[in-house]
Image (spheres, grey):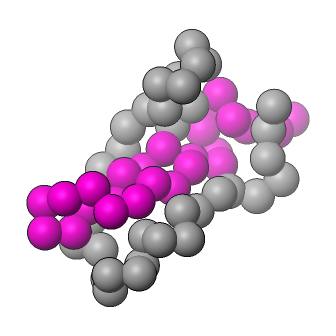
């Protein structure tokens, strides 16, 4: 299944600007879709999907 647009956790910016995004993969299924983990003060604050990743790419 592919989304028409990327999905962004609406809580990412609830604590202000994040320090960085760390690229990772989702482990819910075996597809290994790419995602970005939002980090602020060395803590996980949200997740953002990688719409351009191969596993989630819409042809």
5 left or right of 59?
left
- Depicted 21 relative to depicted 54: above or below: below
29 left or right of 42?
right
Identify the residue at image location x=64%, y=31%: 54
Quarter in which the N terminus is drawn: top right
Residue 59 quadrant: top right
Identify the residue at image location x=47%, y=25%: 27
Identify the residue at image location x=64%, y=46%: 52
Residue at the far bottom in the pictured view: 16
Identify the magenta region: 35-59
Residue 58 quadrant: top right
- Depicted 27 relative to depicted 2: above or below: above
Would you say residue 56 sits in the magenta stretch? yes
Would you say residue 41 sits in the magenta stretch? yes
41 left or right of 35?
left
- Please tell me how many numbered marks the rendered image carries: 0
In this rendering, does residue 51 appear at all?
Answer: yes
Relative image position of residue 17 (x, y in whole percent): 32, 82
Of residues 3 and 59, the one nearer the viewer is: 3
In this rendering, does residue 21 appear at all?
Answer: no
Residue at the far top in the pictured view: 30
Identify the residue at image location x=56%, y=31%: 33
Of residues 41 and 54, the one nearer the viewer is: 41
């Amino acid at each position: 299944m592919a989304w028409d647009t990327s999905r962004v956790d609406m809580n990412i910016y609830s604590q202000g600007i994040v320090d960085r995004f760390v690229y990772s993969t989702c482990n819910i299924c075996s597809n290994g879709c790419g995602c970005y983990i939002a980090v602020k003060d060395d803590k996980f604050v949200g997740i953002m999907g990688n719409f351009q990743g191969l596993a989630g790419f819409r042809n």
